Every structure is written in C-alpha cells, then in structure tokens.
Amino acid sequence: MSYAPDTPTETAPQGGDLVRRHRLSTRLWHWANALALFIMLMSGMMIFNAHPRLYWGEYGANPDTPWLTIGSMEGIAFPGWATIPSTYSLADARIWHLAFAWVLILGVPLYLLWSLVNGHLRRDLLLTGDELRPSHIWHDIKQHARLRFPTGAAALKYNVLQKSAYLGVLLVLLPLVILTGLAMSPGFDAAVPVSAWFGGRASARSIHFLCAFGFAAFIVIHLVMVVLAGPFNEVRSMMTGWYRLPKGKP
Amino acid sequence: MNEAPRILTRRRLLGAGALGAGGLILSGCDKLNANPTFRSLLLEADSWHQGAQRAIGGKQALAREYAVADMSPEFRVNGNADPGDPAYARHAAEAFASWTLSIDGLVKRPLALPMSALQAMPQREQITRHDCVEGWSAIGQWQGPQLGQILSLAGLLPAARYAVFHCADRFGAAPYYESIDLVDAFHPQTILALRMNGQPLTVAHGAPLRLRVERQLGYKQAKYVMRIELRDSLAGLYGGKGGYWEDARDYQWYAGI
C-alpha cells in the first residue's frame, strides 16, 4: 500500500509498509542543496585560509584585534583535504564559491516559497503548540539520546528535534548565510546596505563563518542520524521518495 | 565446516564507499578546477554578479560613506609597498613635483596632467571601506579629483569602453595594471586619490595617486598610476583579462563581489 501525506488513507500505515515520504521538490532541493553546501563549505574554508582571522565591527585587518584566529597567519587554517581546490588558491576558491552561491541564492527563496504554497512548511516542519511544551521536548531529547526512534506510522512525522534542525537550517542558517555573504560584497552592499544590518562588514564575515560552522555541525549530526536510522532506507527515501516504515522492536 | 570469513560486510562496504566518495569528490574537484570548459562556466558568473548588482542597486548606487570616528586606527598596507625602481625613487625624492598623469588611447585630446593641475581641480573627499579580496577591511579617508572630470577633459571617443590604469609598480617582470568600465569610471565616488587620511598619499599607499573605485575590491584600487588608457577592448593587453591579478591568478575582473 502507499501513503501520501497529502491524501490520507483510511487505514494508517504500519511498520514494514513501503510508503511515499519525500515529494519531488524536497528531493531535488535536498541534493542540489547538499552539493552546493559541500562546495560552499570546502571553497569557503580555502577563502578563509587567505585571512584566517575574524573581527567584530565595520572593519578588521592585521593591525586590529580579532576575536578568533585559526592557525597562524603564515600557516594554513584548513588543510588541503578539506578545501576546494586542495592547494592554496584564493582566486580559484572564489570562482567556485561565487558561482555556486547562485544555487543557494536562487534555490533557497524558491524552495521556501514552494514549501509555503504546498503546505510542506506548515504540515511537516512547523512546531505545534503541543510539541513546544518543555516536557515534550525533554521527552524527545531523552528518546534521541537512547537512540529510540519512532516506528510505524509515527516515523512519518518529524519529531521536535528534527523539525527544529530542519527549520533552523531553512529559516535561520540559509537566509543568514546568504545575507552575510551578500554583505561582504562591496558592490551589493552599495546597492542594498546589508552590512549595516549586521553591525558592519567584519561582523557579517564573522556571522558568515559561524553559519558555516552551524552547517558543518548540522551535516555531521544529520549523517550520523541517517546511519543510525538505517542508511539504505533513508537514502532511498531521499532518492526515490519511498520509505519503509520501521517495525517496532518486540 | 566453518563459515568462510566475510570479506565484504555491509558495514565495510559503506565505510569504503564513504571514503571512496570523499576521495573522488576531492580529486574530482581538482580535475574540474583544471578543466577549461568547467572553469569558463564558473567564470561566467562574473558577468551575472555585475548584471545583478547593477540591476538591483542601479548603476549609480553609492558605497557607504563613514564618519571620521569610524576610521581604522591603522590602515594596512598591502600589495606593493614601493615600486622600487630608480625613476620612481627620483620622483619620490622630489615629492612627485614633476609626476605627470597621461590620458591617451580612445580620447579626443590626449593629455599630460601635472600634479598641480590635478590638485587644482575640484576635489572629492570620502571616508570609505576598503575591502580586500582576502577578507580584511579597513576604513580610510580619500581625497582627489573625480575620474569622470578628468576623462571629460580629454573627451572620450565613441568607441571607448574601458579605462585602463597603468602603474609604476610591478610584480617580477609584470607591470601592475587594472581596468574598469565606463559605468564605474564615471561613478561619482570614483576618484584619483591624491591624499589619504588628511595627508598626501604615502609611498606605501600608492603615492602620488591611486585609483579609488569604491564598489569593488582592493586589487582594483591601482596604486602609482602613471597613465590612463581608454580602450575598446581588454583583449591584446598583457594577458587580456584586464588586470595584473586577473591575468596572473584568474581573479574576477568584476570585483564588486
């Protein structure tokens, strides 16, 4: 039997059933986003290598006091296996970073708008009043920590931690990383004074880096959860849309 | 009979797959990076950036100007700090009294302007943020005549599309040069700075005159400008990409991003 969230069937699906889980727009966006984010993170680390210091305020350069320095000015903050390209080239990293930025700058508003129109945002991601009760959140955290994942039809719905993670990426990290990126562009900043919204260009650059750290943390947790929840089933559901509901442990 | 040892478990397969994918991504990216077709595709974004920024903000959008209190206590010196050749050293020794700026190429009246002529023109003073491609920024005060005024004195021929700045400094054998289009050349904040932070430009910051094109990155702010050449194309000049760093490293010609 099949189950689509938009067209509820009479009988609830059970553990072991193969069900439709992710719609095409979500799958396309997931993989475009995954590719773009990896490229942005890796080329971004190479760009960071050119000046591995972060400042708060309107300006910040070598004579000023950074709040964070990674490695030394002579050394390299991020190693070649983590960067695009793998040997030092600020110019090449920028070519990649600024070209793939278009995937995010066009994709994020489009996906957000589409998720608003098709109800994905409201139905699958927005937290309900009940879910926001501290006891509910605490219960979910305990279940996660014990690696007890929902089974049967309950596995079709995202829980509080999942919703928060996906909403955090979609509504906070992605818009923030795009805006702080634009704030660093002198041409765009002249067109729309974005850097002022963040307390200056050096601050925007710092927030941009913190967002990147947030993405890296999200990706690690996301991948660990995929592996723990059954990588084959999870990856299949994001590629084909079909997901086998986990059976409850006897 | 004992079960044969399982060489390929699912766990191992997944692990090997992840490692292999990681390796492929890395070497794949380096291969793509070196692939001329892929590279030119990525470089295509350069014109998108310029088009999008001008469409959103208009061609005349002004870079933010700051107050004296916002200025960097110390403005970092970057790039060449001294052209270091004897001719330049002689000019520096006499405080650039006989330095002239030539304007030629696709102009009606080629000019050779002495420093006194540039100083006598109406001056624009602006406190702006200098954004280096490396990621640092510094805020400083710049003063000098608008480039548009100077170009109008020479009068542009209809075929002129780019202003090229030839500089006294060089990297190895390659002279520094930069170029901008006419939108930026006639932008009100585009000046030939003679003074910085209330003082005549120092050698380290590009004395006696330095281009300020405020909506672009630091490498466009050519120091030690000797000559402005108006051209219809950037092809055929040095590496053909419109600037020293553009030729040497493939930095974007449009450095508004």
Image (cartoon, coloured by chain):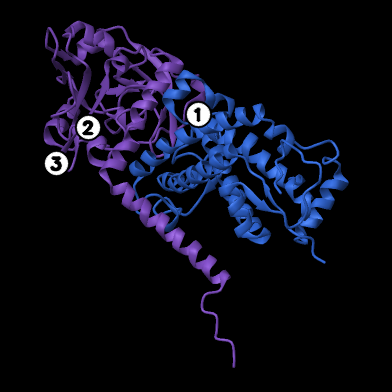
Chain colours: A blue, B purple
> Can you say which quadrant of the picture contains the C terminus of chain B?
top left
Q: Amino acid at mark 1?
A: Ala
Callouts 3 and 2 in the same chain: yes
Distance from disc 1 to disc 2, alpha carbons, whole Å, reads: 26 Å
Is the residue B129 above or below the residue A30 in the image? above
Q: Secondary structure at mark 2?
A: loop
| Letter of the chain that mark 3 sits on in the rendering | B
Q: Amino acid at mark 3?
A: Ala
Instruction: Report the front residue among A161 and B202.
Output: A161
Which circle marks residue B173 in the picture? 3
Taking the spot 62% from the left edge, 37% from the top edge, the residue there is A170
> Can you say which quadrant of the picture contains the N terminus of chain B?
bottom right
For disc 1, the marked residue is A183
The image quadrant that residue B60 belongs to is: top left
The image quadrant that residue B27 belongs to is: bottom left
Instruction: Report the front residue among B94 and B172.
Output: B172
Which circle marks residue B241 in the picture? 2
Q: Secondary structure at mark 1?
A: helix
Q: Is residue B78 visible?
A: no
Q: Position of residue A69 (x, y in %)?
A: 51, 49
Marks 3, 1: nearer the viewer: 1
Q: Name the N-terminal-most of marks 3 and 2.
A: 3
Which circle marks residue B64 in the picture? none
Taking the spot 66% from the left edge, 28% from the top edge, the residue there is A116
| Letter of the chain that mark 2 sits on in the rendering | B
Q: Position of residue A239 (x, y in %)?
A: 56, 49
Distance from disc 3 to disc 1, alpha carbons, whole Å, reads: 36 Å
Distance from disc 3 to disc 2, alpha carbons, whole Å, reads: 17 Å
Q: Amino acid at mark 2?
A: Lys
Asked whether disc 1 touches disc 2, contact meaning CB atoms under 8 Å apart, the reply is no
Marks 1, 2: nearer the viewer: 2
